Amino acid sequence: KDNLLGGTGPATRAIHLGYDPATENGALTPPIYLTSTYAFETAEDGVATFAGERTGYVYGRAKNPTQALLEARVADLESGEAGLALASGIAAITATVLTLVKAGDRVLVDQVIYGCSYSFFANQITRFGVEVIFADFTDLDSLEAEFAKNPALVFFETPSNPNVRIIDIVKVSAMSKAAGAVCVVDNTFSSPIIQQPLAFGADIVVHSATKFLGGHGDLLGGIVVGTADMIFRIRNAGLRMITGATLSAFNAFLILRGLKTLSLRMKAHCSSALAIAEHMSAHPMVAKVLYPMLPGFEQRELAQSQMSGGGAIVSFQLVGGRDMGMRFINALELIKCAVSLGDAETLVQLPAGMTHATYTPEERLRFGIPEDLVRLSVGLEDLDDLILDINRAFETIA
Ligand SMILES: CSC/C=C(/NCc1c(COP(=O)(O)O)cnc(C)c1O)C(=O)O
């Protein structure tokens, strides 16, 4: 009886919203609807449902009850009207963009985003006659000039992958609105627990649910959140007719399970990440540390204006550059060298050669992704164990 949820906090709503066990034989945990299709009592019901004159499920590609609960809960956490679940973060991004832009349109994209998102914009939609403009969204004056080119859609991440640059959501979404562009924010690095871009004026939020929302490194998933109308359009075009990138009911169940501890996990990620960022910045072998809430971080004030925590990503450069970075990664034992982020396991990787290898070296130089940057995704292990692994690695490579 989720009407009791009025005024409750995000942790409570992530666990209880939108589900009443009495509707499912008393099952406390929502059942998984492992069905690809739905039967109708009569042909008339079938026809009416397909015509949208009758609510109901017809086929698993576009709608499923397990996904529907997940969509409702993430939309609620993001303070949006409606949500859409898909098979991965890239599925969420491509279904959204391919629904909203057409040949001849322009899109305005921040120059530092996840590597495959970058490649989708730089190398894929350009094949279909969409013009892509990359710009530095932290330089609002030069960005203003780009809006004069009338983009149909604007896309950015904040904090950005991999160097945690902070983009001013209020200002950029206001510029988008003034230009008549749809403002899409990829909120993967923050999660709705520490940042809600829609509340700051964005039109659409996308997530790689593979990361914090699932939270256990055991699935791929994606989520889009926006107005009911916008989500209807993306569901029926971008998902149903273009990508077909449907999230499995089982993975929807696992992400629902992840949501139950999301608030707890984000607190632990942020606390350990800040401690590790401070530890690294005091270490003589570290040249630079990037973490949104680190005292001395250039954009800390802006981060504090839109985030309630710094997230789990700590990026840094070692004295001695890329070679030392590679040796440091190899010397870690508990911390694993792997891409992805937001897992319980702490992960480390070298963006220039891994997650952002889709940028050419020249593009990385132009857009500000250092060749020697090391990206840490701080997990949920005991902090002392992580600090010990890091210190031992420094001793090994000294
Ligand atoms: C091969 S690299 C592993 C993936 C990484 N990132 C993914 C990602 C996506 C795409 O999300 P999926 O399609 O669910 O992977 C979207 N948006 C952001 C900010 C992301 O970081 C990574 O390690 O940085």
Image (cartoon, rainbow, N blue to C red):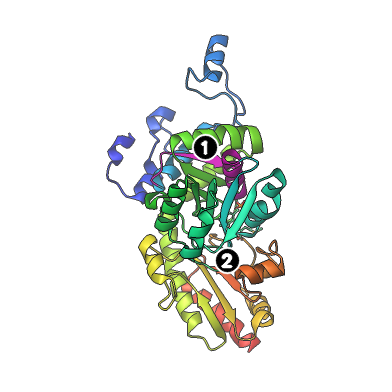
Magenta stretch contains residue 322 = no
Q: Which mark is residue 67?
A: 1
Residue 188 seen in the figure: no
Q: Quadrant of ligand 1?
A: bottom right
Coordinates of residue 115 in the picture (x, y in percent): 64, 59
Tell me if 333 is positioned left or right of 7 in this view.
right
Q: Amino acid at mark 1?
A: Gln
Q: Quadrant of the N terminus?
A: top left
User: Magenta region: which residues?
Assistant: 79-101
Q: Considering depth in this image, is 60 or 206 the residue closer to the camera?
A: 206
Find numbered disc 1 in the image and state the secondary structure of the residue it sits on.
helix
Residue labelled 2 has its Cβ within 8 Å of some atom of ligand 1: yes
Residue sitting at x 56%, y 15%? 46
Q: Amino acid at mark 2?
A: Pro
Coordinates of residue 376 in the picture (x, y in percent): 56, 70
Q: List the residue tagged with mark 2.
A: 162
Coordinates of residue 350 in the picture (x, y in percent): 65, 70
